[in-house]
Image (cartoon, rainbow, N blue to C red):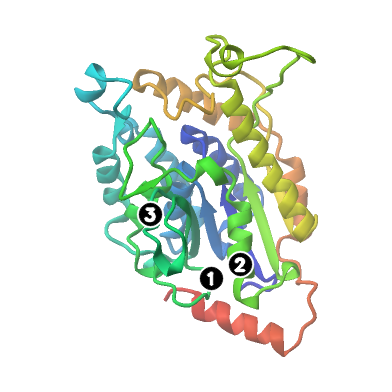
């Protein structure tokens, strides 16, 4: 554990928008080296896969370009042919076979417990099979090596499988091992990470610093004040397809940031999610993936937008707060927390 307590980096979901997040982090780390001090990475969907890639290296700062190169390679998004061509409404757009191969080439068969940093990766389980005496239902599922809850077998989970579970976007990719994309409830994983950190009374809010990075804020709004709207306007409008779903996704992301800020305070929480200065193609929330032929253009555009984003506030927060001594009293309890974090850190 670093002198400032537990440091967590969170990455939103959003498909290729994770490239925007990664380039922001890369730029900020060049200004103020902080990545190698991160104790735990958390991410949803594509952000979850990025978090796993960063957590797999001894020095996460050296893994940023690896993650950017991974997402810049369109092999991850391989069309589900010929099934999707003949039945586009009843099959996923992309196959997860090539996605798995691409991830295995990068992560191998490493388990969560063998990663070099702790991780918190949410997913959504379609059938909990009534385990632990719970009613049988679908339910959120968080894979975490940060929590000390007992029993916790998540450290035995294969990282590639966890990555495909968090990123199995409905309609975009097939269901993977009974799981789908966590973006349906936690596109911003910050509260999931905070909840895991607080479980077991090991950490208190003053001990935790959480840096949350989004995939870019679209300048979206509805000008109508009293429109008598139905499904056509909210869901089926060709000019604004999936407007309602996009609004639900975006509002949930920002609500989580507000909640984390209230719990941790301005010194311990920062949200970096610059507004786009230009239109980004195919960014509607209901469109889980981007056509292969458009990917090179979208990749270039997202990286360019990230290069142009203003990081001055994030840099100021880092300089003022990252590495600051935690406000919690330095007692035997603090020493115990330090011991436990040391025990949690993989060899």
Dot 1 or dot 2: first in sequence order is 1
The answer to whether any part of residue 33 appears in the image is: no
Judged left or right of residue 61, residue 334 is: right
Residue drawn at 54 percent across, 21 percent down: 242
Residue drawn at 55 percent across, 18 percent down: 235
**Alpha-carbon span between mark 1 and mark 3:** 16 Å
Q: Residue furthest bottom?
A: 332
Q: Is residue 8 above or below residue 97?
A: below
* Residue underneath mark 1: 147
**Alpha-carbon span between mark 1 and mark 2:** 6 Å
Say which mark, if any, is on residue 197. Answer: 2
* Residue underneath mark 3: 162
Q: Quadrant of the C terminus?
A: bottom left
Based on the displayed image, in which of its 4 quarters is residue 266 positioned?
A: bottom right
Residue drawn at 24 percent across, 44 percent down: 101
Residue 133: x and y in percent read 44, 68
Q: Nearer the viewer, residue 313 or 184?
A: 184
């Amino acid at each position: 554990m670093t002198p400032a307590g537990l440091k967590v980096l969170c990455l939103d979901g959003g498909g290729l928008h994770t490239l925007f997040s990664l380039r922001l982090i890369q730029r900020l780390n060049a200004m103020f080296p902080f990545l190698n001090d991160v104790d735990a990475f958390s991410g949803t969907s594509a952000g979850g896969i990025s978090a796993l890639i960063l957590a797999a290296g001894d020095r996460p700062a050296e893994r940023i370009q690896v993650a950017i190169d991974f997402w810049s390679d369109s092999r991850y998004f391989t069309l589900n042919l010929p099934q999707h061509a003949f039945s586009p409404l009843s099959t996923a757009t992309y196959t997860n076979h090539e996605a798995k191969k691409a991830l295995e080439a990068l992560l191998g068969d490493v388990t969560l417990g063998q990663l070099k940093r702790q991780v918190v990766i949410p997913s959504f389980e379609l059938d909990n099979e009534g385990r632990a005496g719970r009613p049988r239902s679908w339910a959120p599922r968080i894979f975490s090596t940060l929590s000390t809850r007992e029993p916790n077998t998540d450290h035995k989970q294969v990282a590639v499988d966890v990555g495909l579970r968090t990123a199995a976007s409905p309609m975009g990719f097939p269901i993977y091992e009974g799981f789908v994309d966590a973006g349906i409830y936690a596109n911003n994983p910050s509260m999931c990470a905070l909840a895991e950190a607080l479980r077991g009374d090991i950490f208190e809010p003053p001990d935790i610093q959480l840096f949350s990075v989004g995939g870019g804020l679209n300048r979206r709004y509805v000008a109508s004040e009293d429109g008598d709207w139905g499904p056509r306007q909210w869901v089926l409008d060709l000019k604004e397809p999936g407007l309602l779903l996009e609004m639900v996704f975006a509002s949930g992301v920002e609500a989580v940031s507000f909640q984390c800020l209230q719990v941790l305070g301005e010194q311990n929480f920062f949200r970096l999610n610059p507004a786009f200065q230009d239109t980004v193609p195919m960014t509607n929330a209901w469109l889980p993936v981007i056509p292969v032929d458009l990917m090179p253009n979208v990749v270039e555009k997202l990286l360019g937008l990230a290069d142009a984003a203003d990081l001055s506030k994030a840099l100021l927060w880092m300089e003022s707060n990252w590495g600051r001594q935690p406000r919690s009293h330095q007692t035997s309890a603090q020493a115990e927390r330090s011991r436990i974090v040391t025990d949690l850190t993989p060899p």
